[in-house]
Image: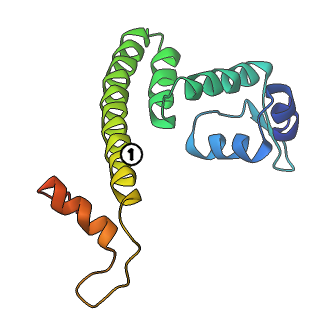
Amino acid sequence: MLTVNELALESDTPAHVVRYYLRIGLIQPAAQQENGYRLFTSNDAARLRFIRMAKHLGFTLNEIKQITQHAELGESPCDDVRKIVQHRIHENRAKIEEMMKLQERMEQALEQWDLMPDGIPDGNSVCHLIESVEGSEGHCHTET
């Protein structure tokens, strides 16, 4: 049986992360000593390594909890795993496209600004560089 610190060492996971996973129910102690020390097995070290691999693939802790609960019930989580990754791939592609568009806007703005002198705020203008981009785009994105 392993204490939290021993489990942390065996699984190459910081002890505070082990305690956090314990608090949110990703791992459960196999036993608890009279002094309050929670005890774990080597299976828990394997669970922590699984959590780390799943996080590396982009799964959230809630998704990992859902996956492990399916496994604990003897159900295959593989269908959910595939769907989650497929959805995440689509999300990532959309984010990449948005980042590429942002990169292009930034590069175009910087090119345009190379030809412009520095300006001083005059009460009507904060930074004429940024304001020149809005004018050239014909519209402005606003965040809510």
Quarter assignment of residue 143: bottom left
Q: In which quarter of the image is the C terminus?
A: bottom left
Which quadrant of the view contains residue 9? top right
Q: Position of residue 68 (x, y in %)?
A: 52, 22
Which residue was labeled with disc 1? 107
In this rendering, the answer to whether 107 lies above or below 95 is below
| Nearer the observer, 113 or 49 | 113
Residue at image coords 78%, 30%? 40
Quadrant of the snapshot with the N terminus: top right
Q: Which residue is situated farthest in the left direction here?
A: 138
Q: Where is residue 141 in the image (x, y as percent from the top left)?
A: 20, 57
Q: Is residue 34 left or right of residue 79?
A: right
> Percent from the top left, x then y, of residue 25?
57, 39
Q: Is residue 91 above or below residue 111?
A: above
Residue sitting at the far bottom: 123
Answer left or right for 104 relative to 16.
Answer: left
1 vs 136, nearest the viewer: 136
In the image: residue 13, left or right of residue 102: right
- Note whether 39 is above or below 17 in the view shown: above
Determine if residue 143 is in view: no
Report the colour scheme: rainbow
Image: 61 above or below 67:
below
State the residue at coordinates (30%, 89%). Answer: 122
The local secondary structure at tag 1 comes to: helix
Tally the marks: 1
Does the image show residue 66? yes
Q: What residue type is labelled 1?
A: Glu
Q: In which quarter of the image is residue 129?
A: bottom left
At horizontal 45% and vertical 18% (from top left) the residue drawn is 70
Graded by Cα atoms within 10 Å as few (under 14), some (14 to 19) or many (20 or more), the crowding at tag 1 reads few
Q: Which of 85 and 120 is in front in this view?
A: 120
x and y percent of residue 78 in the render?
Answer: 43, 9
